[in-house]
Image (tube, grey):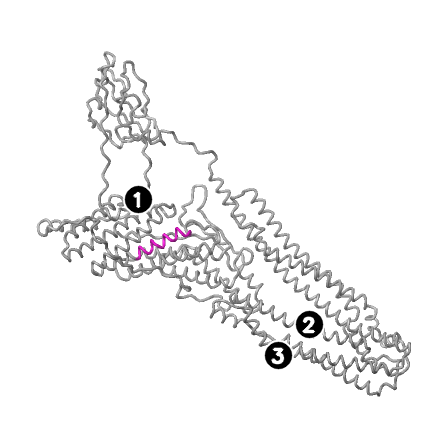
Amino acid sequence: MTNFISVQLKKASEVDLAKPLCKFIQQSYPGGDAQAEHCRAAEELSKLRKSALGRPLDKHESALETLLRYYDQLCAIEPKFPFSENQVCVTFTWKDAFDKGSLFGGSAKLALASLGYEKTCVLFNCGALASQIAAEQNLDNDEGLKAAAKHYQFASGAFQHIKDTVLSALNREPTVDISPDTVGTLSLIMLAQAQEVFFLKATRDKMKDGIIAKLANQAADYYGDAYKQCQYKDTLPKEVFPVLAAKHCIMQANAEYHQSILAKQQKKFGEEIGRLQHAADLVKTVASRYDEYINVKDLVDKINRALTAAKKDNDFIYHDRVPDLKDLESIGKASLVKSTPVAVPLSQKFTDLFEKMVPLQVQQSVSVYNQRKADLVNRSIAQMREATNLANGVLASLNLPAAIEDVSGDTVPQSILNKSKSVIEQGGIQTVDQLIKDLPELLQRNKEILDESLRLLDEEETTDNDLRTKFKERWQRTPSNELYKPLRAEGANFHNILNKAVQADGQVKERYQSHRDTIALLCKPEAELNAAIPSANPAKTLQGSEVVNVLRTLLANLDEVKKEREQLENDLKSVNFDMTSKFLTALAQDGAINEEAISVTELDRIYGSYTQKVQESLKKQEELLKNIQNAHQDFSKMKQSNNESNLREEVLKNLAVANDNFVELVANLKEGTKFYNELTEILLKFQNKCSDIVFARKTERDELLKDLQQSIAREPSAPSIPLPTYQTTPGAGTKPAASSAPTPAPRTMGTKPQPPARPPPPVISAASSSPSASAPSGTAAAPPAAPAAAPTPTPGASAPAANTAPSQAQGPPYPTYPGYPGYCQMPMPVAYNPYMYGQYNLPYAPSPVFQNPGQAPYPPAQQPGYPFPQQPFYPQQ
């Protein structure tokens, strides 16, 4: 009675985890020590998988510890890597643990690019290996009993966890071994076996019989429930069913036995006999039906001895009435086991290889925060730059400060000379020409990368559609057009970005063409620049006026505002605050991250003072520009108006505007060049992502095609041939096939099944009462022919009788002529007919060893229309 059910391990195909994880790390994390450390951790994880799944595992605690550590690592990396078909694509392939395979192909298997699938299969192996370790324990000592109970309860918890999570983890139909029905049954089986171990320990410790009976009765219930769950489902191995049925009967018999001892102690001798009788019937059922699976001889002897002694004592001493089984009180139940919940980490030696890598949810929150920060900083900087451009435009329109610096009217104002010097130092017009020339090449490079990425997706999608059209419902995998939707949306976004960039480039070129000549004039030497500026009468009388002094003071204040603004812009760009710790704390405390609330609060705390300074700067500039415009109006009234003066002032204005446009054009073109270069890196990552998923899809496609070819090869090439009617029709003598699944003995009935009644004797007609009545003279009645022969009526044979001998079950019609291996002619007395005198036992009974293959035991089937078998002719000697 030591038979325990253990579960086979699933087999996994080899997978290289290091390469895809390292690629993701290199794309997502900056280079340096952190990136190198994460890559080393990915290699360690790949080695751990090979140790856990790449070799046969011993039935030992150390092997289970390796599996548990790998499962813990999978749980640890799940929030840190985006495992999916269109991101970190790793295809895990596992075989069905209970599928034995076939002659033409391997075992049933499933391949999915899902970390949840890998976790489910690894946890299944953890439970399976725990069941094997428990089955190997020595149950003759306390240490073995405790270890077995612990492992069975852990296995039950593992299978229960799979039942609860497998459908959500896979999002598709799993293989049979990890389906909810199967793992639910396995969980109950493991729980029943753990309860049985506690029953054995209680028996070993000689606890009270009432407690032992309750433990056994609970174990019987667990076994019975497990059997009910799987008896009509072809999911578990065939040998599991009889073991469950037998254990159900055995544990109930033990419960009745120990309850009978309690009844004896309470002087309820009739109840003692009734329970022992029920226990005896239960173990007899096990011995008759399941003796090849479980040996219950010792239990049978123990119960029979107790029953014999109880009957003897009751017959001679107590004379207590033996109650019916239905009148006995039900035995209570006591459960000492429960499924061990799966709480990560399962291993006591677990250390997170990626401890320093933040979870993916935190990464995403940090990314969104960085975007919010960039928007706030860019918005503030854009406001300041726009204000500066506005101030420069206003001053240029007023020809300031050149108007108040033009003393002689014949020399170039110092502000114009400073602008010219700055433009020349930056490369002048050649710099702008070169930057504009480089833009189309950068744009074309990005377009080619993007087009190549989408071309890879298009080719694979076309191939997938062709195969789906060819194989129809057999082609069971995610359609490429659905899988590539995120990538195509990302590609469309890149297309829009490039189109907007082209439009921006066009606007920059158009503005450059309109100001090119003036910018070129700024690049000339001072003599040429002075010659190009018209001369005018001097305005020396205005230089010492109060209006000019006010203008100079206001312009100086405006320059100071611009310098403060440049410093404020640098401060905004240099502020850096790592939000990782904030988000990690929120995730640890709440289990989720409210990114928007946290980010808004922190941005206001960090950048609140800077945004206030920006607004103050804008307001101060607005007041200064208003005062400058008012002062300039007074200055214009005081100036002597003439055509030369107006023409000179117009040229000086254009030169100031050209300087501002040059500075802005160079900044825009450099930003455009930087944009295209950064976009190239992003598009290369996008191309790698597309290439990786296409490669993974091709690998999956090849594997699926291989499986399809094997399944097609296993299909029959012709329709199945129907069986003859005499083999399929019950009325032709064939008995319907009995169910192969054993049924556990009823818990309330103890009667042993009785054999079927003997068939009635054959009815022989009066006309054929004499075996030689119709035989020709000089002949004798022939002995019976072979059962499968089809004799023809001999002359003078009697008419068919109304009632013939009962027909017996008959197999396929094997040949029975001499020389065939199944032929065996039985010696019969001359003129002897066994049915003639109503005899049922031949004097020479055929031995079962010589029965023809496929034939039923004696007596053989009768031919229609004949009251007795046709006899071969034997001449008189």
- Is 176 above or below relative to 665? above
- Circle 2 is placed at which residue position? 382
Residue 255 percent location from the top left of the image = 23, 54
Describe residue 492's horizontal placement relative to residue 667 as left or right: left
Residue 333 percent location from the top left of the image = 26, 57
- The numbered mark at residue 273 is none
- Distance, label 2 to label 1, CA atoms, is 82 Å
Q: Secondary structure at mark 1?
A: loop
Part of the protein shown in magenta: 178-194
What amino acid type is highlighted by mark number 3?
Ser
Crowd tier of the residue under label 1, counting other residues whose Cα lies within 10 Å: few below 14, some 14–19, many 20 or above:
some
Q: Quadrant of the C terminus?
A: top left
Magenta: main secondary structure: helix
Residue 176 percent location from the top left of the image = 42, 49
- Circle 1 is placed at which residue position? 742
Identify which residue, 81 or 339, lies in the foreground: 339
Question: Are the residues tagged 2 and 1 within 8 Å (C-beta)?
Answer: no
